[in-house]
Image (cartoon, grey):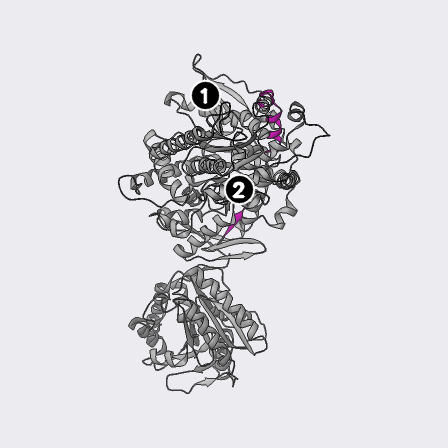
Amino acid sequence: MVSSYCLDQLNLLSTDDFGIMKRIPRVMKVPGVISEFEEDQQTKSLKRVIIVSNQLPLRASRDLFSNEWRFEFDENDLLALLKDAVPPDTEVRYVGTLKADIDVADQDEVAHVLREKFSCETIFLPVDMQNKFYHGFCKHYLWPLFHYMMPRTGSDGVRFDRSQWQAYVSANKIFADKVLEVTDRDDEDEDHVWVHDYHLMALPTFLRRRSHRVKLGFFLHSPFPSSDIYKALPVRDDILRALLNCDLIGFHTFDYARHFLSSCRRILGLHSESNRGYIALEYYGRTVTIKILPAGIHMGQLESVMSEDSTVKKAKELKEKYEGKIMMVGVDDLDLFKGITQKFSAMGELLETNQELRGKVVLVQITNPARSSGQDVQEVLDEANRIAKEVNNKYGQPGYEPIVFIKGPVTTQEKFAYYAIAECCVVTPVRDGMNLVPYKYTACKQGCPVLDKALGVDENSPPKNSVILVSEFIGCSPSLSGAIRVNPWNTSEMASAMYSAIDLPETEKQMRHEKHYKYISSHDVAYWARSFIQDLERACKDHYYKRYWRIGLGLAFRLVALEPNFRKLLGDTLNSAYKRTNSRLILLDYDGTMMPPTSVNKGPSHEVISVLNRLCDDPKNIVFIVSGRDRDTLSKWFSSCEKLGIAAEHGYFTRWTRDSPWETNRSMDLSWKEVVEPIMQLYMEATDGSSIENKETALVWHHQDADPDFGLFQAKELHDHLENVLANEPVVVKRGQQIVEVKPQGLSKGIVVENLISTMRGRGKSPDFLLCIGDDRSDEDMFESIARSSANPTLPTIAEIFACTVGQKPSMAKYYVDDIVEVIGLLRGIAEASVQPN
């Protein structure tokens, strides 16, 4: 569901605001070129939305006698409606290919006309690339996988083809180049680029590489599979990283968004957060917002089509033809996921178990032409024909055919006529994206004055009613709360649901219809478009407040966003300050800073020990390891570092050298551990891969080796459980990087920094150089303490301060390094400077 923020902010258009029939369809001819277009497109606007899709929302046909190309907007294409759904001060331009093969000699002329008259930028892909890109990788590999069909082995299986993937990437780059041509203007900051569907998932990388401040949104119209299925894709990382170069990514349902987030977590190690109703991923300093927003229909356009003579005439014919019968209707594309054969089987079982319905109930199934050819499409058609023939032969009678199977194309007007007459709409794909058929059916059942008059509906007629039988595996299902939901794989359940739909009381049908129509009419295509564009604006509001770095090659490219004062710590800068100073304090976190968190052997390497000893040998230096680990482990690991200071367990234990005694922060009551440890033990036993670390002053539950999703779930549960149990104890319960920790109040690495600086000043060695490096949330306490101290005018000034985090991410530190290798490199650099003469 969309957030209340969107509900409050959107200024929805009424159906009269669209003027759709004045603007759709626009028709023009290209002979030569002959134009019947009367109005001039506005060439400049305050804002511009660039709609990028594999195919332009146009119909193309060629006159057999004049050889002229004719083009018009396709009123059945959702994207064609977007130009009427945006605010009036916004220009819409389209980028995509045509649904027709244009001769090379005519391409330039056609492209010019479509640009000038339809605001369309046309892409002509080479034939071989088009076949491998669209018919190969998109339709025969990606599309089945995104509909939960795992790649199969054997002669009838679809294997990953590297050449098809390369064609996909090449085509996406061509699309990106065309978009950049469109955005190449002085006020490109007003451009919003909205990319649609799985055909163009690599495009964001190519676009972001050359335009880091472009307002870039992506909307997936198909399902997104569960992470277990998505992980079977050999180029899974490339596609996820490409999508994360967007500012906003949209899905029709929460399920699809959840699967995407799970894939990001399991494959890339990224975690999402919810903030004021919005879901977001932090990706290299950029915030990528996730939008959940079901698409809608154009109510004004539907009413106009319903009012047409051809629609009214067909509806009257159908009413006479099916007088006295109960007509159910289904409209689906011809493919293996639309559940047509399951629907026919359920119809057969309905008539088998309910003899009284024989001769009365009719299922009219309309199929749109297949979008791609293949053996699977023919198999579906053959199976559907076989089942329909069996049912009709068994239960049919003279003048009565239980299943009416209409193979398209069928005009929009005819479909609307069937919708208006049908008592029930049956939409039962085994897996699908949004599917707007139930929305259109509901709108047609509501009718319009012209159609109502023709069908004999007046003010004395009963209230409008409708019934929808819908698969639980399609995107519109969550929005239709009054629909009868079914599992299309359960034939008996579907047959029973069909009977329930037929047998519903009239008042129940009316209430369900009213509920659906209220939602559909308010959540129309204008709502969908404006809400997405508004959230894209919000997601991009920080574009001009950050600095950007481009890193990575190919599809591994990503844009790193940094705060204006956040910069990389360079060796030359650090070495220069180091040489100028005489009283230095060096504070180093351990896990994630000196040692990779994924390393099995957690002890320090010989190189780390060597660098630390060289730093400690300089009498001008005081070097400390500041860690959350226990003192016994740290003492053992760093036993060869005689002059190294250690602050263990977040500073509860401190010693200045190997041979000096441990100092404690203060005496504490640790009786709470007797309560906490059994609780953590329960969660450890219930969570495979988790473990407990028992420190002297703290208990830590680790889940880095557990299932990522289950580990996070259990960590939240454990955190909430412990907070409730320990509400009156002098402890804090904190969630960290794959841990839940319970420790006494008043312990933090920030207090360690304050105590060490204070002690040095008390000894007459006030530091003039401070280097602090860490990588996680606990280290932010050190950075915050340093920032607070440096801003306090009552404290002595530290001339050179370098607070540095590992990784490019939001931080209180003013510097960053990319990884642990760079940390060791910086330390080695200043260690070498210690032994060089000034």
| Residue corresponding to mark 2 | 497
- Which sits in the foreground, 615 or 464? 464
In the rendered view, tell whether residue 566 sits above or below residue 656. above
- Left or right, residue 316 beside residue 682: right
Q: How many marks?
A: 2
Residue 744 numbered tag: none
Residue 297 appears in the rendering: no
Asked if residue 345 lies in the magenta stretch, the reply is no
Residue extending furthest left? 155
Q: Please, is residue 405 above or below residue 254 in the view?
A: above
The type of residue carrying mark 2 is: Ala
In the displayed orientation, state which residue is furthest to the right: 460
User: x, y (%) of residue 719?
Assistant: 51, 69
x, y percent for residue 707: 40, 61
> Residue sitting at 52 percent across and 80 percent down?
672
Q: Examine the structure image and report whether residue 308 is included in the region drawn in magenta.
A: yes
Q: Residue at x 57, y 37 (%)?
A: 502
Kindly indicate the quadrant of the structure image that contains residue 835: bottom left
Rendering coords of residue 567 (x, y %): 45, 59
Rendered location of residue 304, percent (x, y): 61, 26
The C terminus sits in image quarter: bottom left
According to the picture, the residue beneath numbered tag 1 turns out to be: 61
Q: Look at 62% across and 50% down and name the residue there.
A: 5
Q: In the visual, does 241 lie left or right of 451?
A: left
Q: In this picture, which residue range is highlighted in magenta?
A: 288-314
